[in-house]
Amino acid sequence: MQTLLKSDPRYYQIAVLTTLVAAGVFVLDFGISWTHAFIILITAQATQYVAGRLSGVPLFDPRSAMVTTLSLTLLLRTDLPGVAALAAFTAIGSKFVLRYNGKHIFNPANFAIVGLMLLTERAWISTGQWGNATIAAFALACLGFLVLTRARRAETTLAFLGAYAALLTGRALWLGDPLSIPLHHLQNGALLIFAFFMISDPKTTPNTALGRCLFGALVALIAHTIQFIYYQPYGPMLALFFAAPVVPFIDVVLRGRHYRWVETTARPLTKTHSEGARQCE
């Protein structure tokens, strides 16, 4: 099992997020609708399958779409089943449409959630206020992910959390507030999902370690500006949405290799299909 989890970090992500969704439904009452969760799952996998076939990808791989499904289930709230379906369709579809130089530009779940929030009032984000015990357990699971993957390509997460915590602490010291205030801002389940399962997406982050550090710090700065200068909610989610188009420019300046999830993905039939399969994961 450990070998399987190490071979592809998405297995660990799916296991952690599935456990969290189950706990949120049966124990903690996160406000998750089973109906919406099922709609998101079916729509996301169907979109992945159809878009893959239309793009010439010979192999159906549900793993990335499953991570997106679970992120949407945990973070997106809406009272309309149609909005839940549209979110899943938009998220997966964006991977195949909004691309540059072999990479999709936006994190799928982030693109769908922010896009729908900007276009309709019927979509919003979970508050992520789960209680200290749940957040502590989930934080341990997130740290376990870093240990399991030996922190490979975790620079974005670490840079974002470090810079965001520094900005929050600096603001508290500047205003003379107690340090319990920045600590409270960091004890948020939605922020942990964002940091470990969204901004860390290796398919939408810069190709070099330095680029990923700069990008993580940039997202933290924009998030802090949105949250505490313009006093708008959902600062990190909005910041990632607006900062994502910067990644191609960073990749031009700091050249590195594109990330590929695993080498254990089933072998495609031809060289052309191989490239297509890798690009659309």
Image: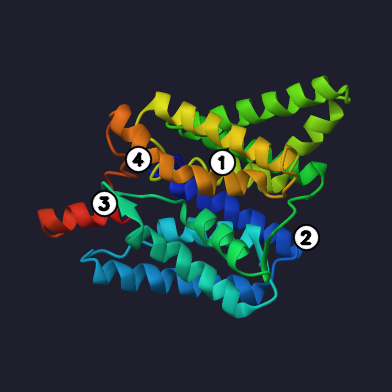
Given this view, does label 2 or label 4 mark the residue nearer the observer? 4
Mark 1 or 3 closer to N-term?
1
Structural distance between the alpha carbons of marks 3 and 4: 18 Å
Identify which amino acid the numbered label 1 is placed on: Phe
Mark 2 or 4 closer to N-term?
2
Mark 3 or 2 closer to N-term?
2
* Viewer-side residue, 16 vs 70: 70
Say which residue label 1 marks.
196
Q: Residue at the spot x=28%, y=47% of the render?
A: 264
In the image, taking residue 233 as reference, residue 7 lies left or right, namely left
Say which residue label 2 marks.
27
Figure check: 269 above or below 35: above
Structural distance between the alpha carbons of marks 3 and 2: 38 Å
Disc 3 crowd rating (10 Å Cα; few below 14, some 14-19, many 20+) is: some
Q: Is residue 135 visible?
A: yes
Residue 116: where, in percent of width, then height? 58, 65
Structural distance between the alpha carbons of marks 2 and 4: 42 Å
Q: Residue at the spot x=64%, y=57% of the render?
A: 75
Given this view, does label 4 or label 1 mark the residue nearer the observer? 4
Q: Given contact means CB atoms under 8 Å apart, are the residues at marks 4 and 1 in contact?
A: no
Q: Residue at the spot x=37%, y=58% of the render?
A: 95
Disc 4 crowd rating (10 Å Cα; few below 14, some 14-19, many 20+) is: many
Say which residue label 4 marks.
248
Identify which amino acid the numbered label 3 is placed on: Arg
For label 4, the SS is: helix
Structural distance between the alpha carbons of marks 1 and 2: 23 Å
In the image, taking residue 29 as reference, residue 271 lies left or right, namely left
Q: Given contact means CB atoms under 8 Å apart, are the residues at marks 1 and 2 in contact?
A: no
In the image, taking residue 204 as reference, residue 254 lies left or right, namely left
